[in-house]
Image (cartoon, helix red, strand yellow):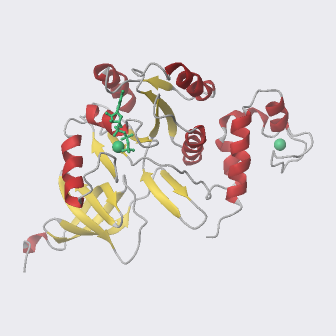
């Protein structure tokens, strides 16, 4: 029989630090264990605090998941996909190039609002001059909504990037999300000196051999007085379905609607085509961006399409 006998049956508390399909990596006070769930459950997310039953020296079964403070997820018509749990701060990483999609930025912001997670925007690659003015103008929309925007260059000004990010990450559980190629992993590599090695090890083991991130991974940040901080790197996405959000959640997830909610003629106004709608009036007067209201209408449509 392999594995030490005394290790078997051990009860452990750990944090899930990586997820790849139904395989998970957990960290119990620095000890790494490969984990699986019981049966076919896939309800575990990176960031989860779990109780494990050890099955061998470096393997365990996930028994229970501790109550989550937040849960970030995406969903399509058929199912939802957990992105990460227990996050307090979310950074949407966009770049001067490749160009980013406003639709995805707003969807990520809506997901953050719905989950009760503070959202920030990072405009990376500001060293690329030609598309910079336009990119700045575009992220300006989110700045005007009240979301902090941070301009960085992981490549040309790495020290300044670290200086900006360290205080923002201190004492927080954070995640970088965004489209592929925006520089999420480059930023993580600046913050976590051995991140690159860890990623390469896993990629080699899984034989992906690609630059692009294929799994979600949590890194502990060098400690501070404020407690244990972490940053999660995640794979780039091209879609961000929010089919799981209800109508009530949606109208509240658009922060600029807030001053107008309750001002509509009908108490159950959906802000789509109703007469004397305060939200539509604000759109017509240019106080709410048309693009954001159009996305709201699209998300309302999606939320009525769920099949689960
Ligand atoms: N010019 C410039 N290039 C950068 C900067 N930051 C990252 N890059 C480059 O952009 C490319 C993509 O960077 P990654 O960090 O892999 O991007 P990512 O967001 O992790 O991408 P996915 O893992 O596919 O989601 C790499 O070739 C980086 O070297 C920057 O500030 N300026
Ligand atoms: Mg990456
Ligand atoms: Zn209305």
View quadrant of ligand 2? top left
The residue sitting at 27% across, 36% down in the picture is 189
Residue 262 on image: x %, y %: 81, 40
Q: Quadrant of residue 112?
A: top right
The residue sitting at 36% across, 54% down in the picture is 46
- Quadrant in which the N terminus is drawn: bottom left
- Between 220 and 180, the one lying in front of the other is 180
Q: Is residue 51 left or right of residue 83?
A: left
Residue 120 on image: x %, y %: 49, 32
Residue 47 on image: x %, y %: 36, 52
In the picture shown, does residue 182 fall above or below 75? Answer: above
Q: Is residue 302 left or right of residue 173?
A: right
The residue sitting at 51% across, 37% down in the picture is 118
In the picture shown, does residue 267 fall above or below 258? Answer: below
The residue sitting at 50% across, 49% down in the picture is 238
Q: Is residue 212 left or right of residue 9?
A: right
Q: Quadrant of residue 303?
A: bottom right
- Between 150 and 71, the one lying in front of the other is 150
Asked whether residue 166 is in view, the answer is: yes
């Amino acid at each position: 029989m392999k594995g030490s006998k005394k290790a078997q049956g051990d009860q452990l508390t750990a944090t899930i630090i990586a997820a790849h399909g139904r395989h998970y990596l957990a960290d119990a006070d620095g000890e790494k264990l490969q984990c699986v769930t019981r049966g076919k459950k896939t309800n575990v997310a990176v960031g989860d605090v779990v109780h494990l039953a050890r099955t061998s020296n470096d393997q365990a079964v996930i028994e229970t998941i501790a109550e989550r403070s937040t849960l970030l997820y995406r969903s399509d018509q058929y199912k939802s996909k957990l992105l990460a749990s227990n996050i307090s701060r979310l950074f949407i990483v966009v770049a001067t190039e490749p160009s980013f999609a406003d639709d995805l930025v707003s969807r990520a912001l809506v997901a953050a609002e719905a989950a009760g997670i503070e959202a920030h925007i990072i405009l990376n690659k500001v060293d690329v001059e030609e598309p910079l003015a336009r990119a700045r103008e575009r992220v300006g929309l989110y700045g005007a909504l009240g979301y902090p925007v941070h301009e960085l260059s992981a490549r040309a000004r790495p020290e300044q990037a670290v200086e900006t990010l360290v205080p923002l990450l201190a004492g927080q559980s954070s995640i970088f999300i965004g489209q592929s190629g925006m520089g999420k992993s480059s930023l993580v590599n600046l913050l976590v000196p051995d991140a690159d090695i860890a990623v390469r090890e896993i990629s080699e083991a899984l034989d992906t051999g690609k630059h692009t991130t294929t799994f979600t991974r949590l890194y502990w940040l060098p400690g501070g007085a404020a407690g244990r901080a972490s940053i999660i790197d995640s794979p780039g996405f091209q879609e961000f379905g929010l089919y799981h959000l209800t109508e009530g959640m949606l109208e509240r997830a658009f922060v600029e609607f807030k001053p107008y909610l309750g001002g509509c003629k009908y108490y159950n106004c959906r802000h789509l085509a109703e007469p004397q709608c305060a939200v539509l009036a604000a759109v017509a007067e240019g106080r709410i961006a048309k693009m954001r209201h159009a996305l709201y209408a699209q998300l309302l449509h999606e939320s009525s399409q769920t099949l689960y």
